[in-house]
Structure formats: C-alpha cells, structure tokens
Image (spheres, grey):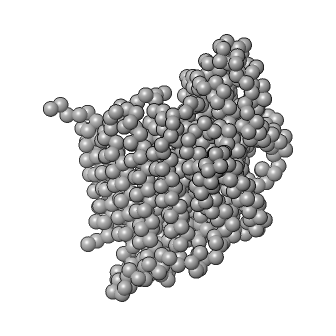
C-alpha cells in the first residue's frame, strides 16, 4: 500500500510541531492571571455552582445570549434558504 | 433594550421572514426587499441620533439588569456602523431588481439584514466575547449568502472553501482570546488595556497575538490566507459581492485594530512590524495576480486584496495620522468597490456572462452604467479629484512622517501598477461592439442604477470636498487610541 | 493536576485539528476538524477558569456555553453546503472541488 504523500507530510509536520510544543511548554510557565484585577464574581466551588453561574449568565452576559439566539436563527434561516424548493431560474 | 440602531436591526431580522411570507401571499416578493430597506433607513436615522452622543465620550448602555450589555460605542464604532448600514441600504435597494428572478427572496433579505446586524454588533461590542458572537453571526450569514444560488456549482464550491477557512480562522481567534483571558482575567477592552498595558512581552503574549492576527486575518484576506477571496467574491450574487468587498473586509480590519491597540500595546513594535511586512505582501499580491485574469468579478475581487494592503499599511504605522488614513480608506473603499460591483452586476445582469471578452463595447449600449463604472474605477486607481486619492495620500504622508519612506513608495508604486488592470476594464467597455448579445443589451433597470449612481455621486463629492470624512476619521482614530489612556 | 497540563492538552488538540484540516479529504471530516479546533479553545477557557483554588470564574464558563451553540450553528450550515456540493460533484472528496483556479 503506497503511503499517501499528503498524509505522510502532514504526519511528519504534526509530530514535529508536537515535539516543539512539549519543548516550549517545559521552558516557561503560563502567567496565570498575573495581570488580573480583583474580580467580584467568583463562585465558590463548594456551593451551588450551577445556580450561581446561571444567575451570572442571565444578569451580566445577556447580550451574548441574545446574539447567540440570533446566530442560531440566522443558521436556521440559512439552512432553509439552502434547502429551499424552487425552480432553477436563469441569471448569474 | 440595548441601543436603538442595533435593536432596530435585530427586530427587522426577526420579523423579515413574516414580512416575506405576507409579500408572498400578495404575489409581490419584492415587498420583502422594501421592508428590509425601510428597516435599514430607520436604523440609519437611529445611528445619526447616537452620533452626537458618541462624539464627546464613549456611550455605555446600562450595565445591570436583564438588558445589561457589554457594549462600548465610541466614534470609531459609529463611523464603521455608518459605512455598513449605508452600503447595506444601497445593496438592498439594488437587490430588489437584481434578485427578482430568484426564489427564496424573503430568506435572502433576512440573511442580508442578519449579516449587517452582525457587523454593527461587532463594532459596537465593548468586550472581546461579544465581538466574537456578533462576528459569528456575520460569518454564518455570509457563508449562506455566497452559496445562495445553489443550482450552480461555482457558488457552492466557493462557499465550501470560504466556510472552512473562515471558521478555522474564527476558532484560532477564539484560542487566542482564551490566552488573553488567562493572562488578564477579563475580556473587556478597557480591562485588557489596563491589565496588559504594562505587561512583560513574554512568549505567551506573542503566541496570543499570532493566533488573533491569524484568526481575524483570514477574514481580512491578509496574504497567505486570502485564497478564498477571489472565488467567494466572484461566485456570490453581485449585491453580496459588494457587501463582502466593501463591508465585511472593513469589519475584519476593525477587529484587528481594536484588539491590537487594546491588548497588545506591550509588544506594539513587533506586532506592527509584522503587519508592515504582511501589508506589503498583500499589496503586491493583490496588484500582480489580477493582471492575468479574464473574469470581471475576479479582477475586482483581487483589487479588494490590494486595497486591504493599503489599509493595513496605514494601520501598521500606529500613529494617529496613519490610522486616520486607514479609516478614511475603509470608508472610501466601501464606496468605490460597492459602486464598482453594483455596476459590474448590472452589466452581468444584462449580458449573462462574466468574461471580459464577451463584454466588448458594452459602454455604448449602457451609457449611464458605463459612466458610473468608469468613475469608480478611476477612483480605485487613486486619481486626484476622486476620493481614493485623498485617503491614499493620507497613508503615504503618514508613512513618510513615521520614517518608513519605503512603505509610502510601495503604496504609490502599487497604485500605478493597479492602473494596469483597471484601465483594461475601461478599454473593454469603450471598445467597438463585437457580439450580438452586446448589440441587443439595453440600459440597466432604474432600481439598479439609482444606488450605483448615488454611490458614485458620493465618490465625486467626497473627492472634491474630503473634509467631513477626514474629520470623522480623525475623531475615530483619536477614540481608538484613547482606550490606552483607560477611558 | 497542574495548569500547564491542561494548556498543553488544549494546544495539542488545536494541532490535531489543524492536522485534520490539512490532510483529510472527506468534507465531513473537515467539518469535524473545525469542531475540534473550537473545542480546543473551549477546553482552554474552562481550564483557565480555575486559576484561584476553590473558586471558579463564571465568565469563562458562560463563554464556553455560548461558543458551543455557535459551533453547532456553523456545523449545521456547513453540512447543508456539503449536501449541495455532493449533488453537484457526486463525491465528498474536497480535492475534486478544483474547477475554480487562478
């Protein structure tokens, strides 16, 4: 079975990228929250995480939820537009 | 609700299918186009009301309660939103006639309004994640709009390639955003500017900047990632090509400059240096490749890549005058490229072909269209009394003032090089008539001529009197740079 | 588990997604590759939300929730376009979609 050229090149590049990644990550650590300021919204994991997270989502990030709803609406409209039943008309 | 222009647009997106269904019952599908156009007009009027408020300080819609929003509307947002809505209005009026033979028109107008809402939401966002959600709304609508005429193979193939590259880019940008979140604990632009303004330029910040530059750069058609653009912009219906080339590309440049000047000020030298090199590559690729093309819309699509190179050259200087030039060029390019694609669409509507060989002499049968097309092509070259000249002059002046004289020379050289293919299109239009299909063609319909001529009138007006656009762009550039001060 | 294991996992998931996009031929597999890329970013967000021990930051979790919805919409549109690509070309091989050149 002749090996496929693209797959071979892709595999070699992928493995070399992975090795570089391991080397790079062992060099320095990630500066987690190094520059962060005090955040008032942290949730204690011992409490009722789901409830508190849900109230945060609906109170502070509601525009993202509305925009996501419109994105899903646009995707539905798009799928309907693509799968519409219509005659083939002319024109470019 | 949130803010009036965005609310109006989203309301019209939600109700457009119902208007389209009602229009279908009355057997006049173009009424859904009229509904969409009226929605855009109302939104433009609402935006004008916002302009006065945003001129003094950024407007923050209420931050608490159910309708809290992380929106931040400053002069740059109003500037970009006015471009998107103005071009959108012209394209909607044009589409009433251009898309009349197609089925599924209500969904077309819904998707067009959704794309415009996505773009306006992107520029109004004050938070990187809100920007990403509206960006995805814009992207999803544009993938479907490119493939709208799916009974032909070409739009489907172009849209497939566009979708794969575009969504891979969005995912890359999301990964970059996650690293920025990890370093600073917040994704709002003010928070990022405050937190990362004095950060150490370590490898993780560079990695995040590379990921975000690549991710938004796919949509902005920076050179190694531009390969989707000629296919998608030429296979889409001409009205959508005008929107893609004029507005969606400008939205990509906006995202780059907003994130860059908020989060990456610590590594500004390296990041802007990379952008300088990429802009020169983009300019040359966009001007040399179309010299070999025979398809009219492909030539215009490649020229969009070249103009992105000019915008990035202005952006990569980092000074206020460089940014003013880049923003003015986004505005002027939307006008010029919009008019060019609308006129090209009118010619294609009459002749049913996109090859330039089959269009010889069309100017003699469609005089108004040909005059409008010629003015927009001359403006794209950058000739003096038209508006392309002023913005390119601003970019070149900024390059000389910043000490990067070679960049200014490159921009001038590219303008001269681009005349090669623009003048070829002009020659095709005014040649003697050779084929019968051109002989029998009539003038374009009025509903298609009026938006094109309106855009051309603006091209000439802003060329002779560029002060309003320049002042608007200058205020926007100042607002963009002010975020580093922490407002 | 230390934080850098999670970040290493997210980055290797990203590399797997890029490998999938670069080498696979079937269009459905390419769509799944895009899903893998988005999930790499989601994993990274969730991992970085636990920076302070004993607390989670709900901002990152809300971002992931919305991102999953958006990924689903993009996949839906992509699969619809693949349906039409199959109707025109008769194959799901993306290397056969080479009529547009230049």
Q: Nearer the viewer, residue B116 or B213?
A: B116
Task: Residue B86 in the image: state x and y as whole percent.
Answer: 71, 50
Can you give x and y, in whole percent of width and height, for residue B142 in the image?
Answer: 53, 47
Tally of marks: 0
Name the residue at 72% across, 37% down.
Answer: B448
Q: Nearer the viewer, residue A29 or C66?
A: C66
Quarter occupied by residue B188: bottom right
Residue at figure coordinates x 44%, y 71% from the top left:
C62
From this view, report whether residue B203 is shown above or below residue B448. Answer: below
The image quadrant that residue B79 belongs to is: bottom right
Residue at left offset 53%, top offset 72%: A62
Name the quarter where the C terminus of chain B is drawn. Answer: bottom right
Q: Give the residue displayed 46% in from the left and 73% down from the top.
A: C59
The image quadrant where one finds the N terminus of chain B is bottom right
Comparing A84 with C17, the one in front is A84
- Where does residue B206 sit, x and y in percent of width and height? 45, 56
Which residue is outermost to the bottom? Answer: A47
Residue found at the far right of this picture = B465
**Residue A61 % position (x, y):** 52, 73
Does residue A1 appear in the picture of this structure?
yes
Q: Check the image and name the residue furthest to the left.
A: A1
Q: Is residue B248 found left or right of B170 in the rendered image?
A: right
Relative height, residue C52 to residue C42 (above, below): below
In this rendering, is residue B431 above or below C44?
A: above
Lateral position of residue A11 relative to residue B187, left or right: left
Q: Is residue B333 visible?
A: no
């Amino acid at each position: 079975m002749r090996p496929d050229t693209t797959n071979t090149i892709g595999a070699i590049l992928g493995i070399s990228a992975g090795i570089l990644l391991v080397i790079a990550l062992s060099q320095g650590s990630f500066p987690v929250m190094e520059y962060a300021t005090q955040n008032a919204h942290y949730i204690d994991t011992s409490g009722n995480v789901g409830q508190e997270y849900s109230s945060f989502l609906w109170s502070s990030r509601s525009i993202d939820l509305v925009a996501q709803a419109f994105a899903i609406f646009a995707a539905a409209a798009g799928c309907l537009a693509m799968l519409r039943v219509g005659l083939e008309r002319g024109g470019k | 609700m949130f803010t009036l222009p965005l609310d109006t647009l989203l309301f019209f997106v939600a109700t457009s299918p119902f208007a389209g269904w009602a229009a279908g019952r009355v057997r006049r599908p173009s009424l859904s186009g009229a509904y969409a156009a009226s929605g855009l007009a109302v939104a433009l009027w609402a935006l004008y009301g916002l302009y006065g408020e945003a001129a003094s300080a950024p407007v923050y819609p209420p931050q608490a309660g159910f309708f809290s929003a992380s929106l931040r509307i400053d002069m740059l947002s109003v500037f970009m939103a006015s471009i998107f809505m103005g071009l959108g209005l012209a394209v909607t009026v044009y589409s009433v006639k251009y898309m009349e033979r197609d089925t599924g028109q209500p969904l077309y107008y819904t998707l067009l309004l959704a794309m415009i809402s996505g773009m306006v939401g992107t520029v109004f966002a004050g938070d990187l994640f809100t920007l990403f959600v509206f960006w995805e709304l814009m992207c999803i609508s544009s993938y479907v709009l490119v493939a709208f005429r799916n009974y032909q193979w070409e739009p489907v193939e172009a849209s497939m390639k566009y979708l794969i590259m575009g969504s891979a880019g969005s995912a890359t940008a999301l990964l970059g955003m996650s690293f920025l979140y990890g370093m600073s604990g917040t994704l709002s632009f003010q928070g990022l500017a405050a937190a990362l303004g004095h950060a150490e330029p370590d490898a993780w910040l560079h990695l995040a900047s590379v990921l975000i530059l690549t991710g938004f750069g796919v949509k902005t058609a920076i050179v190694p990632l531009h390969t989707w653009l000629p296919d998608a912009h030429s296979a889409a219906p001409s009205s959508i090509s005008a929107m893609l080339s004029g507005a969606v590309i400008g939205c990509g440049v906006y995202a780059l400059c907003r994130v860059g000047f908020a989060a990456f000020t610590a590594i500004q030298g390296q990041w802007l240096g990379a952008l300088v090199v990429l802009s020169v590559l983009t300019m040359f690729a966009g001007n040399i490749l179309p010299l070999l093309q025979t398809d009219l819309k492909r030539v215009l699509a490649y020229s969009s890549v070249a103009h992105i190179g000019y915008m990035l050259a202005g952006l990569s200087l980092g000074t206020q005058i460089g940014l003013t030039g880049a923003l003015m060029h986004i505005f002027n390019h939307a006008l010029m490229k919009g008019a060019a694609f609308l006129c090209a669409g009118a010619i294609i509507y009459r002749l049913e072909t996109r090859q330039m060989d089959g269009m010889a002499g069309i100017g003699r049968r469609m005089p108004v269209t040909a005059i409008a097309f010629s003015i927009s092509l001359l403006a794209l070259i950058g000739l003096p009394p038209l508006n392309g000249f002023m913005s390119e002059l601003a970019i070149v002046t900024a390059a000389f003032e910043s000490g990067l004289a070679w960049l200014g020379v490159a921009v001038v050289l590219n303008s001269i090089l681009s005349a090669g293919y623009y003048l070829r299109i002009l020659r095709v239009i005014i040649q003697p008539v050779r084929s019968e299909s051109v002989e029998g063609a009539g003038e374009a319909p009025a509903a298609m001529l009026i938006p094109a001529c309106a855009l051309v009138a603006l091209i000439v007006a802003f060329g002779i009197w560029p002060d309003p656009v320049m002042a608007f762009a200058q205020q926007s550039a100042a607002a963009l740079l002010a975020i580093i001060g922490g407002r | 588990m230390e934080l850098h294991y999670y970040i290493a996992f997210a980055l290797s998931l990203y590399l797997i997604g890029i490998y999938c996009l670069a080498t696979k031929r079937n269009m459905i597999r390419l769509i799944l590759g895009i899903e893998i890329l988005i999930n790499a970013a989601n994993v990274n967000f969730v991992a970085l939300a636990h920076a302070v021990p004993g607390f989670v930051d709900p901002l990152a979790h809300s971002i992931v929730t919305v991102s999953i919805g958006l990924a689903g919409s993009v996949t839906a549109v992509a699969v619809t376009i693949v349906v039409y690509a199959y109707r025109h070309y008769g194959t799901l091989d993306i290397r056969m979609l080479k009529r547009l050149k230049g």
